[in-house]
Image: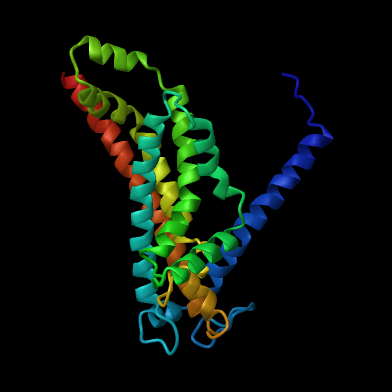
């Protein structure tokens, strides 16, 4: 069988992709490796021994920083943003299935925050709270700032999902006597569920590591990205790398759990369908 020779363009694209992967995952891999420095290790190569010392040190009392508190705040904020992003995006998707007066202007107004620099959004919300005499906090002003970032993405994804949705499923449910709520609950939502899980994960991820929109809106208590940034000028040990490694592992774990849950749900539906 005659083999086709690869042209120069293939090798150029392969080299470009290799550089892309290197720049994307190289810093993460470097932090992961350096987090296993020995007790006398520093922030750079070469490594001075290999141990879990800095991971243990992470859970001890720190001279500066509040790892546990900032981590809990980021998780709570991310979960709140995730739920609101899914609910509001889904409701907007239903609303925009039929055109109404002002729908175009409302859509562009909703996604306009994507083109506004994040730091300006954060500054504007922080100033608004100060003018109103309200204290900025991670659960109020920061929540609103994060939603200006996650909701436009959620809306775009849900709109794309509904554009591919076949309305024949709803018509069939109505022909069988289902009410509008039964059609949504037993037909539409199960079909959209995998995509909604993706919207939720996307919203949680965007919120969990958001820095710029949190900078002026978090108030007196930092979220994890702000805590890490503040500690870069104070902490001079690999404990910072250990924190970065743990948060990265946590992010992948959350994604993995959601995907496993989705696979288990699909498997359960197949078994139930086979029994019926």
| The N terminus: image quadrant | top right
Judging depth in this view, the residue of 131 and 210 nearest the camera is 131
Residue at point 48% right, 61% down? Answer: 209
Q: Is residue 139 above or below residue 90?
A: below
* In the rendered image, the vertical position of residue 48 relative to residue 137, given as above or below: below
User: Quick one: 196 or 80, which is closer to the camera?
Assistant: 80
Q: Residue furthest right?
A: 8
Residue at the spot 35% in from the left edge and 64% down from the top edge: 139
Residue 196 visible in the displayed image? yes
Res. 161 image quadrant: top left
Q: Quadrant of residue 76?
A: bottom left
Quadrant in the picture for residue 261: top left
Q: Nearer the viewer, residue 185 or 121?
A: 121
Q: Position of residue 222 (x, y in %)?
A: 43, 74
Residue found 37% across the figure and 50% down from its top? 82
Residue at point 43%, 63% (across, down): 142
Residue 173's place in the image compared with 111, above or below, is above
Return the x and y of residue 183 as percentages of the image width and height: 25, 22
Q: What x and y, as percent, mark residue 86?
A: 37, 43
- The answer to whether 214 appears left or right of 178 in the picture is right
For the question of whether residue 36 can be seen, the reply is no
Query: How is colour applied across the structure in the image?
Result: rainbow
Where's residue 29, x and y in %? 57, 63
Residue 9 vs residue 69: left or right?
Answer: right
């Amino acid at each position: 069988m005659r083999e086709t020779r690869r042209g120069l363009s293939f090798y150029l694209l392969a080299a470009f992709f290799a550089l892309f992967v290197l720049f994307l995952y190289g810093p993460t891999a470097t932090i992961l490796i350096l987090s296993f420095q020995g007790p006398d290790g520093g922030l750079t190569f070469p490594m001075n021994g290999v141990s879990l010392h800095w991971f243990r040190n992470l859970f001890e009392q720190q001279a500066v920083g509040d790892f546990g508190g900032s981590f809990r705040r980021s998780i709570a904020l991310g979960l709140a943003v995730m739920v609101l992003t899914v609910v509001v995006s889904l409701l907007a998707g239903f609303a925009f299935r039929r055109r109404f007066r002002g729908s175009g202007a409302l859509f562009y107004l909703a996604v306009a925050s994507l083109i506004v620099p994040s730091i300006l959004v954060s500054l504007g919300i922080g100033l608004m709270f100060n003018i109103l005499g309200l204290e900025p906090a991670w659960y109020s002003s920061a929540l609103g700032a994060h939603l200006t970032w996650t909701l436009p993405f959620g809306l775009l994804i849900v709109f794309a999902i509904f554009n591919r949705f076949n309305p024949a499923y709803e018509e069939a449910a109505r022909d069988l006597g289902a009410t509008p709520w039964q059609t949504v609950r037993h037909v539409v939502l199960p079909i959209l569920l995998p995509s909604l899980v993706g919207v939720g994960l996307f919203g949680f991820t965007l919120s969990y590591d958001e820095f710029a929109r949190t900078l002026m809106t978090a108030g007196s208590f930092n979220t994890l990205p702000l805590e890490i940034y503040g500690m870069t000028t104070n902490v001079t040990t690999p404990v910072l790398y250990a924190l970065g490694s743990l948060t990265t592992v946590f992010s992948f774990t959350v994604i993995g759990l959601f995907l496993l849950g989705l696979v288990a749900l699909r498997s359960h539906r197949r078994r139930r369908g086979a029994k019926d």
